[in-house]
Image (cartoon, rainbow, N blue to C red):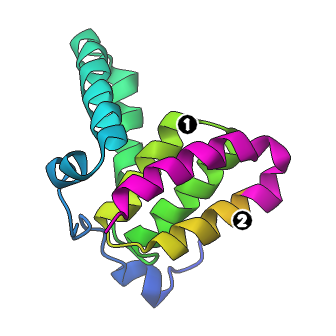
């Protein structure tokens, strides 16, 4: 069975870690909401890590690699993650993607537009999650 050759863009698409403008520590210092989220996430991940579950490790690796720089820049992948998370109504995921987007230098206006897409796609059920996202955005983008 013959397979189609890969396009030149696909063959040369290098995946690499994104260049963050801010560290998690800088984000935590800027926002109490972000600090609580990051601290809680770290603590809960330690519990998961202790289980030493191969399937969980594989999934975490897949998740990590999804958001690397590639043909689609990491900032756009994080914004897509934000939209999907808002539509799925996952506050933890929304917080994560808002923080990651901020770390990558995404503007507040870009994040708000992404949330607008989520609102149109997900409908009014997204509104309570949008409110909480805006609270985090307000802390992160405070002058």
Q: Position of residue 112 (x, y in %)?
A: 58, 67
Residue 87 seen in the figure: yes
- What is the magenta segment's predominant secondary structure? helix
Tell me the residue at 69%/40% (across/down). 128
Left or right: residue 47 compared with residue 107 = left
Secondary element at tag 2: helix
**Distance from label 1 to label 2 (Cα)?**
16 Å
Q: Is residue 129 magenta?
A: yes
Closest to the observer, 56 or 74: 74
Q: Image height check: is 11 above or below 83? A: below
Left or right: residue 46 versus residue 65 is left
| Image-quadrant location for residue 73 | bottom left
| Quarter in which the C terminus is drawn | bottom left
Which residue sits at x=44%, y=78%?
Answer: 71
N-term-proximal mark, 1 vs 2: 1
- Indicate the quadrant containing the N terminus: top left, top right, bottom left or bottom right: bottom right
* Left or right of 8 on screen, residue 4: right
The residue that mark 1 highlights is 91
Horizontal and vertical percent for residue 75? 41, 70
At which x and y percent is residue 135?
50, 48
From the viewer's perspective, is residue 143 above or below residue 30? below
Provide the residue span drawn in magenta: 119-143
Which residue has dot 2 on it?
A: 117
């Amino acid at each position: 069975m013959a397979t189609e050759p890969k396009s030149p863009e696909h063959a040369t698409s290098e995946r690499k870690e994104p260049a963050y403008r801010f560290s998690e520590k800088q984000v935590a210092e800027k926002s109490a909401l972000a600090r609580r989220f990051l601290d809680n996430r770290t603590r809960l991940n330690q519990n998961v890590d202790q289980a030493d579950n191969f399937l969980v490790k594989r999934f975490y690796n897949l998740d990590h690699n999804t958001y690397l720089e590639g043909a689609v820049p990491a900032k756009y992948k994080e914004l897509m993650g934000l939209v999907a998370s808002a539509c799925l109504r996952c506050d933890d995921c929304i917080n994560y993607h808002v923080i990651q987007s901020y770390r990558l230098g995404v503007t507040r206006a870009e994040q708000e537009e992404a949330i607008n897409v989520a609102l149109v796609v997900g409908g009014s059920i997204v509104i309570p999650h949008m409110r909480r996202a805006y609270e985090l955005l307000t802390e992160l983008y405070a002058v």
